[in-house]
Image (cartoon, rainbow, N blue to C red):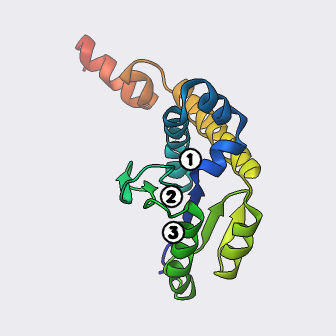
Amino acid sequence: MSCPLPQAVLLVDGYNIIGAWSCLKKTRDTSGLEAARWELIEALTSYTAFQGYNTQIVFDAQYQHTCSNKEVITELLSVYYTDFGQTADTHIEKTCASLRHLIVQSKISRVIVATSDRVQQLMVQGYGAEWISAQQFCYDVEATVCRTRHKYQQRKQSQGRFLANSIDPKSRQRLAELRMGLK
């Protein structure tokens, strides 16, 4: 009996992605950074569930004198805010370094870092992680949303509004006979 493939870990450089995706930049510029963060979190909630990745979105403390903080959004999605003075890059690199031995031991299948920061791309590759550019990541997320929507619409169209539409014709006939007192 074969074991399922170990889970992948996706590390997302939050502000890098917000700055690279035109829709998130627009939200940031019109509604503020908080709104752009939540829009990214919402987009990655569906993406993470569909892909089955253990996703961590990392944001810099961004001029706030606060301690690091972790918010669990779903079972597979967490948001990290770094300590004051620590960058998301540093946090992601440390995480990649700590996960390296899990890849070697096959406890996780891969570590993927979403960023367009070229220096960080080279650093995480040194730890055995893969990287995806912010633009390619945007395409992947949009494609996944489309696939999910298409899958949902097919399922929705195949079933009617009534329970009787979801059972086989023989059972439906039997229920009709019972209802009319024929048998």
As measured in the structure, the alpha-carbon distance from the residue carrying label 3 to the one carrying label 1 is: 15 Å
- The disc labelled 1 sits on which kind of residue? Tyr
- The disc labelled 3 sits on which kind of residue? Gln
Q: Residue at x 49, y 36 (%)?
A: 34
Q: Which residue is mark 1?
A: 47
- The disc labelled 2 sits on which kind of residue? Thr
As measured in the structure, the alpha-carbon distance from the residue carrying label 3 to the one carrying label 2 is: 10 Å
Q: Evaluate whether residue 167 shows in this view.
A: yes
Q: Earlier in the sequence, mark 3 or mark 1?
A: 3
Q: Would you call the spot at circle 1 few (<14 residues within 10 Å), some (14-19), or many (20 or more)?
A: many
Q: Which residue is mark 2?
A: 55
Q: Residue at x 50, y 43 (%)?
A: 41
Pinpoint residue 147: horizontal percent, then vertical percent: 65, 40
Q: Would you call the spot at circle 2 few (<14 residues within 10 Å), some (14-19), or many (20 or more)?
A: many
Q: Nearer the viewer, mark 3 or mark 2?
A: 2
Tell me if label 2 and label 1 are in contact, CB under 8 Å: yes
Pinpoint residue 153: horizontal percent, then vertical percent: 58, 28
Q: Nearer the viewer, mark 2 or mark 1?
A: 2
Q: Quadrant of residue 125?
A: bottom right
Q: Residue at x 75, y 51 (%)?
A: 136
Pinpoint residue 85: horizontal percent, then vertical percent: 49, 62
Q: Which residue is mark 3?
A: 7
